[in-house]
Each structure stands twice: as structure tokens, then as C-alpha cells.
Image (cartoon, rainbow, N blue to C red):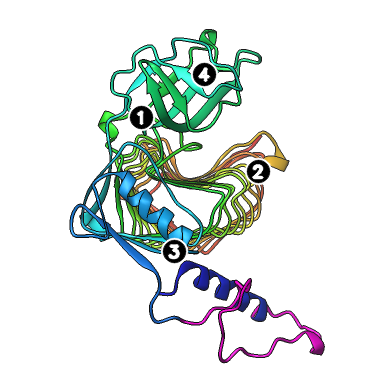
Amino acid sequence: MPAPSQFHSRRRFASILGAGIALPAFARVPKINAPRATSGDGAVEPDWEERLSITVGNKKADLVGNSERVIQAGVDWVARQGGGTVKILPGRYHMRNAVHLQSKVRLLGSGTDSVLFKEPSFSTLMAADSDWYDQEITLADPKGFQVGDGIFIEAKNPHHGGKDVYKGTLIARSGNRFKLSKALRKNYWLPGKPSVFSLFPILNCEFVEDVVIENLTLDGNRENNANLNGNYGGGIFAQDCSRLTFRGVTSRNYNGDGMSWQICHDVRVEDCHSHDNAGLGLHPGSGSQRPIIVNNRLERNNIGIFFCWGVRHGLAEQNRCLENKFGISIGHRDTDNLIRRNEIVGSTTTGLIFRPERGKSYAPHRNVVEDNQMVNNGPEDGAAVDVKGWVEAITLKNNHIRETRAPARRTGVRIGADTKDIRLVENQIAGFAKNVDRLKK
């Protein structure tokens, strides 16, 4: 497989040539028949027969160990050389901190035989105030915390009452005083009851690009860990990134989201299995543009696929959303997305919901839902598809929406009174007390 940088740079180049834009004669680019590696040219690369890689494993590897430290060492080594592949050999890796990915790194596991396992979390209150410029905290009970642990701090802001959070690493210790990897930038004072947790994403991407995570199993050890909100963590968590690929990854049992990415563009998630997570199976987060979510299995999460805020021009295709609370949820300014050929079965609340927002300008307009199979979604008085709020210009086309349990008071498609231009085209709806219910003001 081509390295991530080559794959994505070629894709960008091809999109320019194939976009159907008529270029003036002087601007037309000749075909490149014999590419050469040239300093500073990231757009075109030769198709090298062999690329840089390193192995990490519990034994008989370039780097030997059974924790996140050995994987991090491999990531840092290949990143220092300009990119490459870290091969995670079969084994169980005990995680007390996240692995922080770097640009142009491919993390390649051995499928179900490479398991990154989150160690049990510990929590305690802070025992002394820390100001926004401090780089240390004092723990009321340091039992269980170790130097090198990833931590999450949560507190009430002492000035406006909102919530402040911090993510970092414990890097030094004297008794119950710990130095942090980076300074605080908020005041964590005792009246706000600052709590410290040994919580972190298993794999973390921040301000990186051209990363591939492939054929790995992530186990969040949910029953022995406190909850970490999906805006800050998950089995995989990404923030402010571009061109990420998650392929063939299992993310399970995380007390939070299976995979979450915030303000990340051109993220591709394919052939993954996200199941039994307390939060969201897949969380294309705020401001993320052009996510491609294809051929994944999302089971027994709170929500299978959650389009967050301002997710646009995305594709969710051929996914199986099974026995989640909500199959797919779409809302705040999530516009111009295509939800196609998915299977949504056994959702306990709703199969597909267009969330109610605070007004027309906040609603998820111009989305297309077509060729999906939706079976047995919602309770006895629920709706398989629930279009709420002030949403406009939605097309539901050629969907098969079925109920095989009993009609009871179930509705196939419920359309809110404030919606506008909701088009139902050639859908097959059967088994409900009411196939379509257009609410009136």
C-alpha cells in the first residue's frame, strides 16, 4: 500500500485534474510519467518498492515492550525520519497514556491479535489551588497515579461557573505533588472542586495530517474506567487534523466514544467495528468537512453515527448500525450530507433523527437519505425516522422502512410542524400504525 502522504497527495492532484474545470491552455499540466523525489515537493512521489518501517512487539521486534511507551517510541522514530510505518506485532499492550500520532505515520496492527488495552482509571480531588500559570498539581489521594500517566482534569471555572478541562501527562513527582507536561491555562481552585482522572484517548491525533491507523483492536476496559466525554477523548480521538484514515480498526468497551474527530477534514473511516461504547460509535465532530464513513459496523453504542455541529459534504454509506439507542443522528448546521445504503436495525429510541435545533439558521438542511434499510427501530410509540425542528430541503428516497414486531403506536416517518420542503420519494414503508405523520402547528 502507498504511504499515507503519497496516497493523499495523489488524491489531491487527481481531484484537481478530474474536477471538470476547464483550464486555460497555458495552465494545463502535462502528464507525469517518471516522477522523482524533489526537495519540498509533497504533491508527487515515486511509487517506491520499499518504505521505512519499524516493528514493535512484546518480544522479537525492533522495539520490545508491552505498554504505550514502546509504540510511542516507534511513532517518534519514523516521524523523525519524515514518515513511515509502525508495525504493531501480536500481543497485548497495557495503556497508561495515549499514543500521540505524528504526521505521515501509518500505525499498522495485526487485527484482533494486536490489542491496546486501557488500564483501570483512578480519580481524586485536588488538595491545593493551582493557578493558570502553574505547572503542577497536588492530589488529595495519589494512590494509583504514576509518573508517565495521562490525566484529565475537570473543574468549575471560579469566575463564570462554566466547566474547564485539562489534558496532559504527569512527568515528575514528590509525594502527592506532580509536575505536568504543560502548564495550566485556567485557574483550578478548590471551590470549583477540581477532579483528576487517569483518563486519555487510546490513540490521539492533534494538529497532524496524513495519518493512517489500520488493523488494530482498542479495548477501553469500560467497566473499570470513568467516563470521558467524546469532545475530549475516545478509543481514537483527533483534533484539528487533516487527511486521517481509520481502516479495519475495532474500538470497543470505551467509557465514551469509539472514535471521535473534532475540526478534522477529509477523514476516512472504513471497515471498522465500533461497539459497546458508552458514547458514540463514530463522532464526526464540530466543523469537520467531507468525512467519508463507509462499510463500518456500529453496535450497541449510545448513537451509531453522530453528525455533530457543522459537519458538511460528508458521506455515510453501507454502514450497519445495530442495536444502538439512536442509529444515526444529524443536527446543528450539518448540511449537504449523503446518507446512503446503510442498514439501521433495532435502535431503541429512533433509527434516524434530525435533531431539533434552536432555529432555522441552526438546522441541518439539504441532506439526502436514500436506499437505506431500516428495520424495527424505536419503542411502541416511537418513529423509525424523526424529522424535527426547522429543517428544510431534506430528501428521503427509495428507503425501505419496516416494522415486524407490531404496529402498536409506531410511526414510519414523523415530520415536524416547523419543517419545510421534506420530500418523500418512492420509499417503501410497512408495518406501522401510521406510515407517515406530518405534524401540524
**The C terminus lies in which quarter of the figure?**
top right
- Tag 1, which secondary structure? loop
Q: Earlier in the sequence, mark 4 or mark 2?
A: 4
The structure residue drawn at horizontal position 70% and vertical position 86%, both measured from the top left corner, is 29
The residue that appears at 38% across and 23% down in the rendered structure is 173
Q: Label 4 vs label 1: CA separation?
A: 22 Å
Q: Earlier in the sequence, mark 3 or mark 2?
A: 3
Give how far apart the Cα atoms at labels 1 and 2 are. 46 Å
Q: Nearer the viewer, mark 3 or mark 1?
A: 1
The image shows residue 413, relative to residue 295, as above or below, that is above
Nearer-N-terminus badge (1/2)? 1
The residue under label 1 is 147
CA separation, marks 4 and 2? 31 Å
Q: Based on the picture, tell me whether residue 390 belongs to the magenta stretch.
A: no
Q: Earlier in the sequence, mark 3 or mark 4?
A: 4
Tally of marks: 4
With 360 as the anchor, is 131 left or right in this view? left
Name which residue type carries label 3: Arg
SS for tag 2? loop
Please tell me which residue lies in front, 188 or 79: 79
Q: Residues within 10 Å of mark 2 (few under 14, many from 20)?
A: many
| Eye-nearest disc, 1 or 2 | 1
> Looking at the rendered structure, which numbered label has been put on residue 155?
4
Quadrant location of the N terminus in the rendered image: bottom left
* 35 and 432: which is toward the camera: 35
| Mark whose residue sits in front, 3 or 4 | 4
